[in-house]
């Protein structure tokens, strides 16, 4: 419904070469626009609090606040090249539709620019030593990471759309 009715989002996606539809730049009010997104925000807030505890964040008098939440409908063959989420603390995604072959999330070791002469890792290296980690989500999966962590959505090899909802938390 969003993808078909949000003309501004369609135009932005087209202008920026997004292979499908994203509400990233066009709809900033999803949690109040539809109760299903409001309920999602409530659940994500709890996950973000738990994640902040696991990360031993000292938030002082501040707290984590959901700054943005947006929908991504990724067409077959489309991807999203490596990026970080500036101005945020925790970023993540909830996966709605992951047909067979749907892109995994590719996470990149942030130390790569410091490893000019380092040998490559063996294929059987423990996950924590691998340069890239691929997480294959299922519908309902929630992934969160610190916003400085570079990540990528490789080309969607599924025959149909991969649907996810991304979000950023700031520290206030
Ligand atoms: Fe991202």
Image (tube, helix red, strand yellow):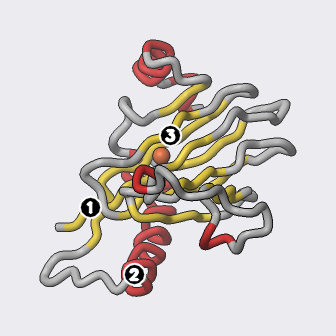
44 left or right of 20 in image: left
Residue at mark 3? 82
Q: Secondary structure at mark 2?
A: loop
Distance in Å between CA atoms under marks 2 and 3: 23 Å
Q: Residue at x 29, y 48 (%)?
A: 86
Between label 3 and label 1, give the one nearer the viewer: 3
Residue occupying the far front of the picture: 117
Of the numbered discs in the image, which one, if any, rests on residue 170?
A: 1
Indicate yes or no: mark 2 CB to ligand 1 under 8 Å: no
Residue 151, percent across and down?
52, 49
Mark 3 vs ligand 1: CB below 8 Å: no
- Estimate the spatial distance between the alpha carbons at disc 3 and disc 1, rounded to whole Å: 21 Å
Q: Nearer the viewer, residue 13 or 42?
A: 13
- From this view, report whether residue 104 is shown above or below residue 43: above
x 70%, y 74%: residue: 126
Secondary structure category for the residue under label 3: strand
Tell whether 95 sits left or right of 32. right
Circle 1 crowding by C-alpha within 10 Å: few under 14, some 14–19, many from 20: some
Which mark is in front, 2 or 3? Answer: 3
- Residue 152: percent from left, percent from top: 56, 43
Residue 55's tag is 2
Q: Secondary structure at mark 1?
A: strand
């Amino acid at each position: 419904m969003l993808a078909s009715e949000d003309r501004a989002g369609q135009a932005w996606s087209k202008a920026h070469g997004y292979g499908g539809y994203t509400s990233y730049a066009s709809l900033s009010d999803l949690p109040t626009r539809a109760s299903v997104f409001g309920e999602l925000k409530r659940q994500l807030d709890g996950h973000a609090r738990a994640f902040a505890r696991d990360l031993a964040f000292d938030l002082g008098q501040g707290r984590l606040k959901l700054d943005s939440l947006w929908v991504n409908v990724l067409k077959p063959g489309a991807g999203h090249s490596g990026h970080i989420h500036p101005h945020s603390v925790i970023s993540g995604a909830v996966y709605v539709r992951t047909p067979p072959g749907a892109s995994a999330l590719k996470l990149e070791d942030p130390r790569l620019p410091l490893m000019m002469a380092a040998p490559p890792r063996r294929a059987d290296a423990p996950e924590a030593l691998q340069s890239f980690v691929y997480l294959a989500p299922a519908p309902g999966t929630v992934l969160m990471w610190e916003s400085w962590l570079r990540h990528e959505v490789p080309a969607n090899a599924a025959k149909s759309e991969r649907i996810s909802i991304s979000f950023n938390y700031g520290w206030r």
